[in-house]
Image (spheres, rainbow, N blue to C red):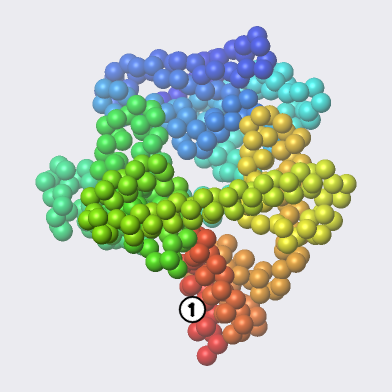
């Protein structure tokens, strides 16, 4: 890990509305001694540049990768982090820098000045005068993630996925060197077998994000290696990326699915493929029709038009649902007593309402409209509380079961609440699973089916 001293901090620009840009710093590779320049951020203001938060959280900020040998890692540099929406003002001084107190105070003073200048006059300022200090990037990231509602358990799970990814990458490199790739004796095949239970949707989502990051940073060689790793691990583990939604199916496969679906399963099939059904799909389907015998074309064309009309109807229904959700949100935001209105209109609170609400929170935060974002967040909390108040004890238990991290925890929770587990509860879980299946929520269906099985087993 290289270090960047605090006096490398870029000076504030005259226009206080602009965030401090990164400074290009010249460093020397500790592995091959090649010199190269890297951009170094020392001040992050998510109210001005919200995209910097995800860059930092994904480990893509202040990383130096040698263009000559590929070695590198995260730079140790002072950092100020300001999130006006959450009233976070943090500073980071990595231990390896060994900065004196005078240097730290000078850095904090400069960062504080910039933060105060960029805030609207009516915005709260007290939290900026008492910045929280960190000595490791990991502890700062955990605090930021906790502020986003991400628990330590979730963070630990992500670290475990990254550790597995690291072991698989090392195994692939070993196989390349030893010529044992694609053999049962290969290290990668053994590593996949060892970690097979961990190679799930979240793991491959993490791996895909690393590939995307490498491509964005111009690290083509790393992206190709990780891409190769993904393909081989998917093959060895039997993971289906298309079924999991991580990879788009081929156009011909979409056409076949829509063409061959029964009338009873057509809407479910459309829901599953809706994100990839476009003009290219219909053009390919029409081209296939033209090759059919004349006797078959009439029925095949009728099927195509039936699919078109079904999609148009489903899209119109979805549009109406989101428009109704948007109108309800307007009424709630304007109400003198939002909680009372939410209770009165609780039957209209749908998943679409929560999607619209979350989208508005994100948009307000990106636009720096902190008061609106806070008001919307308060409404969201009220909505959750109102819905929980109206739930039956069985519905609350199902909600809790869906939020636990593992099947083992779900089993413990069921046994703890065994008084609520009866035939009606099992029926309710199965009915909810069917509803989620029709809505294309595969990730929830599997968990609900498992809960139903566990609950049924406790009845005997």
* One can see residue 165 in this view: no
Q: Residue at x 59, y 12 (%)?
A: 11
Q: Residues within 10 Å of mark 1 (few under 14, many from 20)?
A: some
User: Which quadrant of the figure has residue 49?
Assistant: top right
The residue singled out by tag 1 in the image is 453
User: Which quadrant of the figure has residue 412?
Assistant: bottom right
User: Which quadrant of the figure has residue 266?
Assistant: bottom left
Measuring from the top left, give residue 129's x and y in whole percent: 74, 27
* One can see residue 441 in this view: yes
Query: Compared with residue 113, is residue 141 higher up or lower down, i.e. above or below?
Result: below
Determine the residue located farthest toward the bottom in the rendered image.
Answer: 460
Query: Compared with residue 136, is residue 12 higher up or lower down, i.e. above or below?
Result: above
Q: Residue at x 72, y 33 (%)?
A: 370
Measuring from the top left, give residue 251's x and y in whole percent: 32, 47
Measuring from the top left, give residue 139's x and y in whole percent: 56, 41
Left or right, residue 452 beside residue 252: right
Q: Residue at x 30, y 23 (%)?
A: 67
């Amino acid at each position: 890990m290289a270090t960047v001293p605090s006096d490398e901090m870029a000076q504030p620009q005259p226009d206080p509305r602009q965030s401090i840009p990164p400074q290009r710093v010249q460093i020397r590779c500790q592995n091959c001694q090649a010199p190269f320049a890297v951009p170094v951020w020392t001040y992050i203001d998510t109210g001005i540049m919200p995209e910097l938060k995800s860059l930092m959280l994904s480990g893509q900020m202040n990383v130096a990768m040698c263009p000559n040998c590929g070695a590198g890692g995260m730079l140790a540099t002072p950092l100020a982090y300001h999130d006006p929406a959450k009233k976070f003002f943090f500073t980071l001084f990595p231990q390896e820098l060994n900065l004196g107190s005078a240097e730290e105070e000078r850095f904090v003073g400069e960062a504080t000045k910039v933060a105060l200048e960029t805030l609207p006059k009516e915005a709260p300022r007290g939290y900026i005068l008492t910045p929280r200090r960190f000595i490791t990037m990991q502890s700062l990231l955990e605090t930021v993630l906790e502020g986003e509602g991400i628990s330590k358990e979730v963070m630990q799970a992500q670290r475990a996925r990254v550790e597995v990814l690291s072991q698989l990458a090392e195994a692939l490199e070993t196989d390349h060197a030893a010529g044992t790739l694609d053999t049962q004796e290969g290290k990668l095949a053994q590593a996949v077998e060892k970690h097979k239970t961990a190679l799930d949707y979240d793991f491959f989502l993490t791996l895909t994000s690393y590939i995307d990051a490498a491509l964005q940073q111009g690290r083509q060689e790393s992206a190709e290696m990780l891409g190769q790793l993904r393909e081989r691990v998917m093959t060895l583990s039997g993971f289906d990326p298309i079924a999991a939604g991580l990879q788009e199916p081929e156009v011909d496969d979409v056409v076949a699915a829509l063409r061959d679906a029964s009338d009873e399963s057509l809407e479910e099939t459309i829901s599953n493929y809706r994100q990839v059904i476009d003009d290219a799909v219909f053009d390919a389907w029409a081209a296939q029709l033209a090759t059919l015998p004349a006797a078959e074309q009439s029925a095949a064309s009728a099927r195509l038009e039936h699919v078109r009309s079904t999609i148009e109807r489903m899209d119109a229904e979805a549009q109406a649902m989101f428009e109704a959700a948007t109108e309800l949100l307007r009424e709630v935001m304007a109400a003198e007593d939002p909680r009372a209105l939410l209770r009165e209109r609780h039957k209209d609170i749908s998943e679409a309402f929560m999607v619209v609400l979350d989208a508005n929170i994100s948009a307000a935060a990106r636009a720096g409209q902190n008061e609106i974002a806070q008001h919307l967040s308060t409404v969201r909390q009220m909505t959750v509380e109102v819905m929980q108040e109206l739930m039956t004890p069985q519905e609350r238990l199902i909600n809790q079961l869906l939020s636990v991290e593992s099947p083992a925890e779900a089993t413990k929770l069921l046994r703890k609440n065994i008084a609520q587990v009866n035939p009606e509860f099992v029926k309710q879980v199965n009915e909810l699973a069917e509803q989620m299946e029709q809505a294309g929520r595969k990730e929830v269906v599997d968990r609900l089916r498992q809960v139903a099985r566990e609950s049924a087993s406790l009845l005997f």
